[in-house]
Amino acid sequence: MYELNVIYSALRLYCNRKNYKLRVSDIILSFGFSKSRFYDWVEMYPRNVVFECNIKEINKKQKQHIKYKRMVTDEIDEYIVQHKTANPIANNKKIRNEIKEKFNTKISRSNYFRVLKCHNFTNKRIQKNKYPYTDEKLKMQKETLNH
């Protein structure tokens, strides 16, 4: 569908995107490719033929990690870990809102939980006893309601 020289020029631009300070979305929009098709080409065409720079091969998992690291900086990562260590039962939404205010960056729930997972935090829900009285008084209240 696309000519080979157009694909090659897009892939060369992808390779040198740091020099031009471009994001992948900028390249995709300028050429009119779909994101999935573009990444298929990145994996399909041999780098030594297409690219004019030396880039080591990266697998799919590493690409996802690079994308995640772009969204969550080391400062945000450290802030989440410190906050969760200090207060393990803190409200996750409040922490994300604090990050939004402090770092002027909105992070998604998935990125937030990915940070916790990378640092071996678990997020277990705790059931709280909401009835403030003893079990005996609770039974008495139930009995009076039944009669």
Image (spheres, helix red, strand yellow):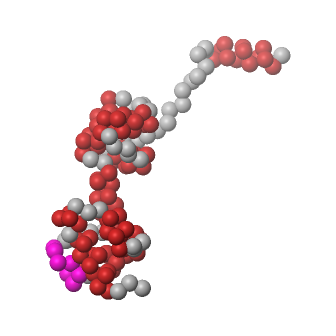
Q: Position of residue 57 (x, y in %)?
A: 24, 72
Q: Quadrant of the N terminus?
A: bottom left
Q: Confirm whether the magenta stretch covers residue 53.
A: yes
Q: Position of residue 87 (x, y in %)?
A: 36, 29
Q: Compared with residue 3, is residue 98 higher up or lower down, i.e. above or below?
A: above
Q: Compared with residue 112, is residue 139 higher up or lower down, i.e. above or below?
A: above
Name of the residue lying farthest toward the right? 147
Q: Compared with residue 6, is residue 24 higher up or lower down, i.e. above or below?
A: above
* Residue drawn at the location 24% of the way across and 41% of the way down: 75
Q: Confirm whether the magenta stretch covers residue 42.
A: no
* Residue drawn at the location 38% of the way across and 45% of the way down: 107
Q: Is residue 84 visible?
A: no
Q: Is residue 144 visible?
A: yes
Task: Find residue 133 and report its image quarter.
Answer: top right
* Residue drawn at the location 16% of the way across and 74% of the way down: 53
* Residue drawn at the location 27% of the way across and 81% of the way down: 8
Q: Position of residue 97 (x, y in %)?
A: 40, 36
Count the numbered circles shown: 0
Residue range highlighted in magenta: 48-54
Q: Compared with residue 66, is residue 11 higher up or lower down, i.e. above or below?
A: below
Task: Find residue 93 and report its image quarter.
Answer: top left
Q: Quadrant of the C terminus?
A: top right
Q: Position of residue 23 (x, y in %)?
A: 29, 62
Q: Nearer the viewer, residue 107 or 140?
A: 107
Task: Find residue 132 and report its image quarter.
Answer: top right
